Image (cartoon, helix red, strand yellow):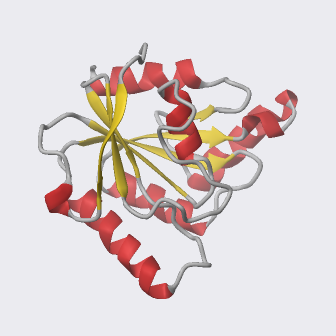
Amino acid sequence: MNVNNVCLECTAVKLAQYPIDGKPEVAFVGRSNVGKSSLINYLVNRKSIARVSSVPGKTRGINFYNVENKLYFVDLPGYGYAKVSKEEQEIWGKMINEYFAQRKELKLLILLTDIRHSPNELDKIMVKWINDNNLEMIIAATKADKIAKKDISERILDIKSTLELTLNQEVIPVSAEKKFGKEDMWDIIVKKLNV
């Protein structure tokens, strides 16, 4: 998709604040600092529509980005960041669970995992939840520029095996920094959402 128009529609911390226009939603989930905001910026051809930080745990609410008035990209707080208080972790967990449980507009999840490392227990739990709820999912293997091209296939096999993915669950290597993987991601998004 050729993206010319994108804006931050709203930042929500509860259901009543979500957009109500019924557009399909693509939610970005993953560990803190895995590159969710960077990937969103890359996919919509912007440098900083989604705030990027080297400090994990920067996304505190659920950010809804209106893309071409056709769909929303939904940036969720990262999971697994230990340096925020237990209370804050519980608030984030409740907020994310409410979004997942209540949002009929959610059509596709993009689970980000750092290609350099095997997915962890939290990633496995997230994939199990996605599968149990019969949601569509793509795995974006981020930071693919940080490894040799010859190692990409091996790392993708490790991700597929660790997460016990089905044959139709794709892993796309991406790099916001070196600019590759965007077309593959958009092809799947457009096909799955029919936008």
The quadrant the C terminus occupies is top left
The residue drawn where x is 51% and y is 66% is 79
Q: Choose between 125 and 23: the one closer to the eye.
A: 23
Residue occupying the far bottom of the picture: 86
In the figure, residue 139 lies in which quadrant? top right
Residue 179 lies left or right of residue 60; in this view the side is: right
Q: Position of residue 83 (x, y in %)?
A: 62, 78
Q: Is residue 159 left or right of residue 9?
A: right
| Image position of 79 (left or right of 33) | left
38 up-or-down from 63: above or below: above
- Residue 101 x %, y %: 23, 61
Residue at screen point 41% across, 15% down: 1
User: Residue at (14%, 60%) from the top-left corner?
Assistant: 16
Percent coordinates x, y for residue 134 in the rendering? 30, 48
Left or right of 101? Residue 4 is right
As rendered, which of 131 and 18 lies closer to the eye?
A: 18
Pick the residue in front: 54 or 189: 54
Give the tally of numbered discs: 0
Residue 174 visible, this orientation: yes
